[in-house]
Image (cartoon, rainbow, N blue to C red):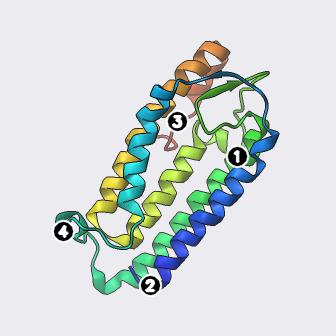
Amino acid sequence: MAAFYNVLFPALWVAWAVYWWSPSHSLKATARRESIYSRLSHIAPMLLAVFLLFPPTFPVPVLGDRFLPLAQCRVWGAIGAVVNLAGLLFTVWARIHLGRNWSATVTLKEEHELVTSGPYGIVRHPIYTGLLLGAVGLAIARGEWRSVLGVVIMALAFWRKLRIEERWMLEQFGDAYRSYRQRVAALIPGVI
């Protein structure tokens, strides 16, 4: 990946992280939170995915091999940057739309609302979709197998987390959530 993108991608993710944590003080009170063990079951794989995706170089040769040609790395870098930015912006839209119901962990808030409009009318878990899209953008720009592995691990971690969330939402909202699940895909519109 060109030196420019080695600066651009971390800058995009840092800017996203700063925004992400800044409005965290104005959330609804928590009524129920997942256990630390449950949380570790998806956080540990996420950390591994980040370790695979973000470093400019990687010490394991086979994972550092390219799946996209190096000769076109500027083109792939530009495509990856657009995809990455689109994913991060999708998460921001979802976070804004979710409002005070948002939480970084699997949580039910006091007076929790079932949000099904905006990005939640496109996929049930738009923040995960956006983060995965951002990771795919980074993987395209990197062009290395390690980044593909990182995206797969990230997808599995989100799948684990969303299964917990789905169970809690069914318990909380019953038939309304069942109906929502039938209308709207979990992560990829019309697919899954």
User: Residue flagged by tag 2: what amino acid is it?
Assistant: Ala
Looking at the picture, how far across and down is residue 173, in whole percent? 67, 16
Few, some or many C-alpha atoms within 10 Å of disc 1 (few <14, some 14-19, many ≥20)? some
Q: Is residue 166 found left or right of 71 in the rendered image?
A: right
* Residue topped by disc 4: 61
Q: CA distance from mark 1 to mark 2?
A: 31 Å
User: Residue flagged by tag 1: what amino acid is it?
Assistant: Arg
Looking at the picture, how far across and down is residue 129, in whole percent? 53, 47
* Residue topped by disc 3: 185
Residue 3 — which label? Answer: 2
Q: Residue at x 44, y 84 (%)?
A: 3
Q: Residue at x 30, y 86 (%)?
A: 71
Residue 148 visible, this angle: yes
* Residue topped by disc 1: 95
**Placement of the C terminus among the 4 image quadrants:** top left
Q: Observer-nearest residue: 168 or 83?
A: 168
